[in-house]
Amino acid sequence: MINLLTQISEEVGRVSVLFEGKVSVNAKSFIINKVNTLLSLEEYSLSPEYIEDIIRGEKIAKDYKESTLAKNLFEVYEMSAKINPCSINDMLFAYKMLLGSIDTLSYEFREDGKNDGTMFETDLIPSRFVSGAIRDVLEWYKRNKLHPLIKSAVLYFELEFLKPFKEYNGIMSRLWFDMLLCRWKDIFLLVCVYDNLTKRRDEYKEVLYDACKTGECNKFVELILETVYERLKNADMPKDGIKVDEPKSINKIYKKECMDESVTVNIASSFTRKLLEVMGDEVLSTNEIMLRLGMTHKPTFRKNYLNPAIELGLVEMTLPGKPRSRHQRYKKIS
């Protein structure tokens, strides 16, 4: 693992220099590549071109659920800069986004007897322990002094092992690992580390199966580090003729600073659109808006919906001088 970390650090430096000031095609193309790779690992057959058509609303796959999943996963990636990967509430929020328009009974953690029937079904821990286990893993990640890559790979394994959701656990675990990588180094905004994993799918499944059976994740962590290294080692410049600004730090975005529009899609667009739709022309309280959105967690609502809409000048307060007043209401700006 130490050797791999050294090699990865060298490749991160090389790729950062390679891309610096030269590469950052519209973030949409990078996100679509990530969506396509994550879905292909789950044996979905949509091509990047087809996924782009779905996102534009021009096509729907024969399987409507598959099309909706691709579109929702794209929107989660759009929003990822404002999602805290160490927050259990944000994890549930991202899962709700992933399944937002898909027919499902629950956006929460799984319940006993209602899992998705995957390979480790008989070894699942009882559902009543899932929430506490996820909190423990996230707390461990925040406090442990191990290298961020090692911690991220271990957290990736824990999500695969715990299978906290009713379905799409593989997509969520890989999505979360990708978010953690982007928090560590911005270059992973432009690199999909799972491209190489698709070529080692059988090996990946075997290593994961053995790790979950024994509870020892060393080989799994090594495999993930190997795939990260191989992907970085084979990273090349995009096609000639594409030259735009360098992406700004995702860590700055997380602190609510701006991101270059040439590197990302408007990360709040899908949320502000939904907020404006439910508000209509009415003057509403926070609780009334949350009720219409089907939300219960106020900090997440404010961070992802209300505050961005106010910052963009789309929504205004009726009592701007008293933002915390219990009489505060919000209305859409014409």
Image (cartoon, grey):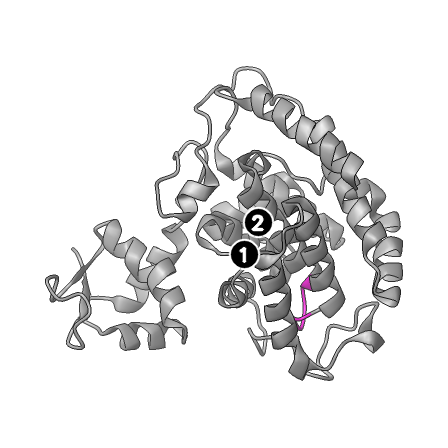
| Direction from residue 189 to residue 221 in the image, left or right | right
Amino acid on which the number 2 mark rests in the picture = Met
For the residues labelled 1 and 2, the Cα–Cα distance comes to 7 Å
Residue at image position (72%, 76%) is: 115
Percent position (x, y) of residue 77?
52, 49
Extreme top residue here?
Answer: 241
| Image quadrant containing the N terminus | top right
| Image quadrant containing the C terminus | bottom left
**Which element carries disc 1, helix, strand or loop?**
loop
Rendered position, 332 above or below 241: below
Residue at image position (83%, 65%) is: 215
Number of the label disc, if any, that sits on residue 85: 1
Q: From where the camera sits, is residue 86 visible?
A: yes
The boundaries of the magenta stretch are: 164-169
In the figure, residue 321 lies in which quadrant?
Answer: bottom left
In the figure, residue 189 lies in which quadrant?
Answer: top right
Q: From where the camera sits, is residue 231 visible?
A: no
Closer-to-camera residue (104/9)? 9
Amino acid on which the number 1 mark rests in the picture = Pro
Taken as a whole, is the magenta stretch helix, strand or loop? loop
Q: In this figure, which residue is indicated by the disc labeled 2?
A: 179
Extreme front residue here?
Answer: 145
Percent position (x, y) of residue 252?
41, 41
- Circles 1 and 2, Cβ within 8 Å, touching? The answer is yes
**Which element carries disc 2, helix, strand or loop?**
helix
Residue at image position (25%, 49%) is: 312
Residue 333 inside the magenta-drawn segment:
no
Number of the label disc, if any, that sits on residue 218: none
Percent position (x, y) of residue 233?
73, 27
Rendered position, 79 above or below 215: above
Percent position (x, y) of residue 86?
54, 59
* Mark 1 surroundings within 10 Å by alpha-carbon count, few (fewer than 14), some (14 through 19), many (20 or more): many
